[in-house]
Each structure stands twice: as C-alpha cells, then as structure tokens.
Image (cartoon, helix red, strand yellow):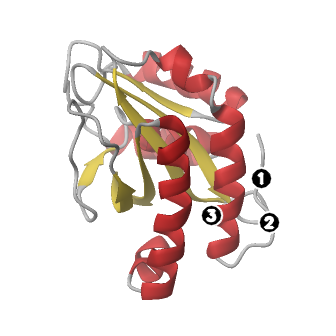
C-alpha cells in the first residue's frame, strides 16, 4: 500500500507537508516507512536543518530488528506471525546496542506493543535515536510508521518521547492520506 501510494505525486506532496510540519515543531528529521518483507523501506522523508543527522534516501531499506519503524511493525504482529518472522530474520549486530538475542528482542517487542511505539536507542547507527508511531487503518492495522530520528548527543530518546502526542496526531493525519478516516491511537 505504502509503495503504491509513494508513486502518487499528490500523496507525496501531502505527506511531505505533514512531515514538514512535524520537523518544524521538533527540529528533527521525520520519515514515513512501510514494512517490506523482512525490512522497512523509507517512502518519504523530510530532513531537519541540523548539522549532525542521518541521511537516508526514500527507497532505502533497513532491518526490522534494530530500527524504530521495524520494531514497531514487529511489535504489532500477532504472536504466531511475529515468532515466524523472528525465526527467519538474521539479527545482525549493527552497533553495540543492537538486540541480537531472539528472547531479548521478544521481550522488548512485548514492551513496545504495550506502549504502541517503536524505538531505536542507538541500535541501527551509533549516536542516533529514533521513535516510531503507527499510521493505522480504521480496523487498527498498521499501514506505515511515522518515525522521528535525532542525534543522541542533541536529543535523548526520553526527550523524543515527550513529543508522542504530536507524533500520534500527525500519524492520524497521515492515515487520512492513505484513505483512512481516522488513525489508531495505542
């Protein structure tokens, strides 16, 4: 769905407008990701005007197990689907903080599911943190993830979490762009 929407110029313009509004309030890079098999794919992105930032082009694929969006998608799966997918993933260590033990990752995903978020605490790139919220269909399915990334030297993960109300409200707006009337708040 997200990859099809990405090709729509009107969708991209409206999506970028929502992301720009979030970036202008937070001062940090925001992007929209979708699950693409065993990875996440960045479908749209608005970068902050910060010197220290992570640059990823739309279309970039990243692992599920160590990215905020990826962990959000994993956490939202039912237990059977999550277990099947985790068995097939290679939990490659990207940084010293990457969770590479399946049992530890399952515990983290259970915690994130309860919170309704995904986090990256320097697990994908050293020095970068990320927070993801779901962009949901009316029936609660996660269509995409709205993700905010920041340099850990500038903003802590707990500081990003203070902006959850803004991120969740923006995710509802993005859900409307996907043709959904309301977003799902976890």
Viewer-nearest residue: 20 or 89: 20
Residue 5 percent across, percent down from the top left: 48, 80
Secondary-structure class at tag 1: loop
Q: Which residue is mark 3?
A: 174
Q: Which comes before the other along the chain, label 1 or label 3?
A: 3
Q: Determine whether label 2 and label 3 are within 8 Å by CB.
A: no
Q: Which residue is mark 2?
A: 138
The vertical placement of 10 against 139, above or below, is: below
**Label 2, label 3: how far apart the Cα atoms are:** 12 Å
**Callout 2: 10 Å neighbours few (<14), some, many (20+)?**
some
| Residue 161 in sight here | yes
The vertical placement of 57 against 162, above or below, is: below
Q: Which comes before the other along the chain, label 2 or label 3?
A: 2
Residue for point 34% across, 32% down: 66
Residue 95 percent across, percent down from the top left: 20, 20
**Callout 3: 10 Å neighbours few (<14), some, many (20+)?**
many
How many marks overall? Answer: 3
**What is the quadrant of residue 21 in the picture?**
bottom right
**What is the quadrant of residue 137 in the picture?**
bottom right
Residue for point 28% across, 35% down: 50
**Label 1, label 2: how far apart the Cα atoms are:** 7 Å
Q: Which residue is mark 1?
A: 184
């Amino acid at each position: 769905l997200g990859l099809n929407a990405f090709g729509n110029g009107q969708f991209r313009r409206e999506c970028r407008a929502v992301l720009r509004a979030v970036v202008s309030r937070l001062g940090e890079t925001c992007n929209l990701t979708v699950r693409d098999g065993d990875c996440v794919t960045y479908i749209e992105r608005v970068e902050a005007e910060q010197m220290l930032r992570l640059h990823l082009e739309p279309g970039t694929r990243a692992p599920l197990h160590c990215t905020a969006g990826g962990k959000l998608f994993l956490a939202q799966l039912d237990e059977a689907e999550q277990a099947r997918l985790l068995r097939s993933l290679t939990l490659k260590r990207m940084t010293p903080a990457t969770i590479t033990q399946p049992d530890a990752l399952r515990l983290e995903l259970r915690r994130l599911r309860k919170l309704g978020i995904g986090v990256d605490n320097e697990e994908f790139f050293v020095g970068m943190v990320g927070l993801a919220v779901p962009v949901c269909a009316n029936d609660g399915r996660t269509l995409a993830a709205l993700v905010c990334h920041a340099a850990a030297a500038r903003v802590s993960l707990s500081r990003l979490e203070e902006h959850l109300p803004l991120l969740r409200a923006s995710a509802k707006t993005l859900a409307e762009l996907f043709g959904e009337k309301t977003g799902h708040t976890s």
